[in-house]
Image: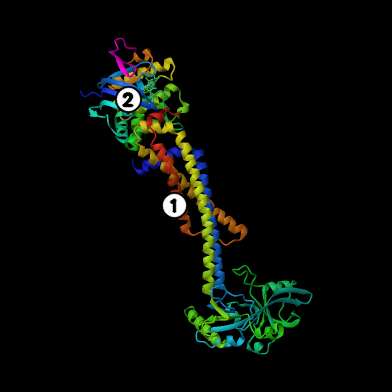
Amino acid sequence: MNATATLRLALAALVRNRTRSLLTMLGIVIGVAAVIVTIAIGVGASAQVQTNIQKLGANLIVIQPGSITAGGARSGFSGASTLTPQDGLAIAALPGVAAVSPLVTLRTQVVAGQNNWQTSVSGVAPSYTFIKSWPLASGRFFTQSDDAAAAKVAVLGQTVIAQLFPDGSNPIGATVLIKGVPFTVIGTLTPLGQSGMGQDQDDTVLIPYTSAMERLTGLTTVNQLMVSAASANVIDAVQNEATTLLAARHRIAPGQPDDFQVRNLQSIAQAAASTGAVLEFLLAGVAAVSLIVGGIGIMNIMMVSVSERTREIGLRMSVGARGVTILRQFLAEAALLATAGGAVGVVVGIAGTTAIALAAHWPTQIPPAAVVLSVAFSALVGIFFGYYPAQRAAQLNPIEALRFE
Amino acid sequence: MTPVVAVRDLRKVYQLGDTEVAALRGVDLTIEPGEFIAVMGPSGSGKSTFMHIVGLLDAPTAGTYAFEGTDASNLDADARADIRSRRLGFVFQAYNLLPRTSALENVELPMVYSGVPEAERRRIALEKMEIVGIAHLAKHHPNQMSGGQQQRVAIARSLVNNPGLILADEPTGALDTATSLEVMRLFARLNAEAGITIMLVTHEPDIAAHARRTVAFRDGLVVGDAPNRERAA
Ligand SMILES: Nc1ncnc2c1ncn2[C@@H]1O[C@H](COP(=O)(O)OP(=O)(O)OP(=O)(O)O)[C@@H](O)[C@H]1O
Ligand SMILES: [Mg+2]
């Protein structure tokens, strides 16, 4: 008997036992749908983390204080910073460097009239908006001369504006008190939304780093140097040269650990990607387990089916079916059930994913390979778990099978 | 002419735990083409065992069996299945039709395994259903038919591969007297008009009387073999 004939026999048997077939499929449907939904959420989330990291800025290299110990673990950032704006100027002179901005951060109270708000205040250089690819919504950004004068000017993020100017009035020209010091608002930033780490990036006030150091922190050091390489090709070179330069400037003896660390966005992106991969792997594992449970369901029902249909098997054998033909029919039934269950599961999974994306506003993505693989896997599950019952059916003795009550 | 069935000193021993049950203890029998034989005997005399071996559903423990001139004593399960598929037809006491399946599809079933193309299957099945007088029930399912009608479906099914031998184990065992008579007349007509060789197992002399020859079994041996002088009509 050829394959089409076997499939048609199997199909006829499945249609004859419609309810049982549908119930058997249910396990696989749920398994495959679970696989699709979890993969869609996992892939969607890590894709969003990636784009968010890309959004952080062009060819960004971040230099932070602190060292890497021999074991590879980072010592805390809490250690006193040794990074200075002069380090930044020196790095800016290196070839391949497009822009450098120091970053001085503090959390403090900002007051405008009756309204006040606890926010993150960042002291940065004029190149900051370029480094972050963050355009202004209105007004202007500060200049070199604002920097040189430690001018009391500020640029506000949208969340801060919403908190301090709830009546919708134009903040430009208004005075805000930052840690009690009056600053004039000269510009507003476009909304950026949440960062990949879930922070509200618009909850920020930008001021010249010189003003932040002289008027707010009173320190001569900065929290971070943000360096933008001229192109993606020179990121590694810039990173190496900046490391060498800073080590020399900080008089780090050879063999001693640096008191700073230089990281680029790619390494951060890679770290995030590997975290995402672990997550996807876990989710897919859980989903695969549910598929296997579905397969065991198939085996169960096929076993029941074989004993329920013992007389039918005996009859088929008596009219000339070989054992192997019976085996193939039962295998085909299991594979058909599992594949059909897989196909329905894909539809349910896509529908479920869409529903979740709409309801929870989660980013989701369904890779076509996941669809193909989960259907193929469920067919395999069907064949694997269908084999034992099919084998039992094929080995029945026709006389005993016919006599079976 | 080559006999359809030729068995010599056929023996069958069943192993039941430690005890051995000798169901057949040396049967000799020849069935020529066109014969209509009734096998009779008390319960446990080995009638069904004999029919299963002749029908190649089971293998003998000892002795020889030639089916249509070829030795069939030592065939494996697949080879037996192939001969059943092409040359043998079965009718059972319990009809054994596939449930939730139309009469037509039930009749077609043996041809599915012997590889007859679909259109041809349909044509042959309808033709045989016509012969046994149930063509108008082609679309009915077994649970929509009387016992006699179901047994006719089973008889049509046994005919589709033009078998050299039809084996019927108590085919009227589940039917009332009137329906039994109709079914036996059908067998007699198939034998007389189409020349189909039939071996039928029964307890009842009235039923056996429709055959042309009666073989009596007792304790696994043939104890009587005679043509029927007075055939029922
Ligand atoms: N599968 C089996 N295992 C063990 N013993 C068996 C088996 N089949 C039949 N027997 C025994 O073989 C003997 C013959 O049985 P068989 O079924 O051939 O009798 P029968 O003439 O058909 O009887 P009945 O008229 O009751 O159908 C009996 O003693 C029976 O118990
Ligand atoms: Mg019997």
Q: Is residue B156 above or below residue A366?
A: above
Quick one: A14 or A270, which is closer to the camera? A270
The residue to which callout 2 is attached is B12
Q: Position of residue A273 (x, y in %)?
A: 52, 67
Tell me how many marks there are.
2
Question: Where's residue A236, x and y in %?
Answer: 48, 79
Based on the picture, tell me whether residue A307 belongs to the magenta stretch: no
Please rate how many residues cluster around mark 2, counting C-alpha atoms within 10 Å: few if below 14, some from 14 to 19, many from 20. Answer: many
Name the residue type under label 2: Lys
Chain letter for mark 2: B
Figure check: B157 above or below A324 = above
Q: At 32% from the left edge and 25% from the top edge, which residue is drawn?
A: B12
Q: Residue at x 72, y 78 (%)?
A: A171
Q: Residue at x 41, y 40 (%)?
A: A390
Q: Position of residue A164 (x, y in %)?
A: 74, 74
Q: Nearer the viewer, residue A344 or A64?
A: A64
Q: Is residue A90 left or right of residue A110?
A: left
* Marks 1 and 2, how far apart at CA: 49 Å
The single residue placed furthest to the top in the displayed view is B230
Q: B160 and A210: which one is in front?
A: A210
Relative image position of residue A259 (x, y in whole percent): 58, 81
Magenta region: which residues? Answer: B214-233
Residue B167 in sight here: no
Q: Amino acid at mark 1?
A: Ala
User: Residue B210 occupies which quadrant of the picture?
Assistant: top left
Colour pattern? rainbow
Residue tagged 1: A376
Dot 1: what SS? helix
Instruction: Say which mark, if any, is on residue A307.
Output: none
Q: Quadrant of residue B196?
A: top left
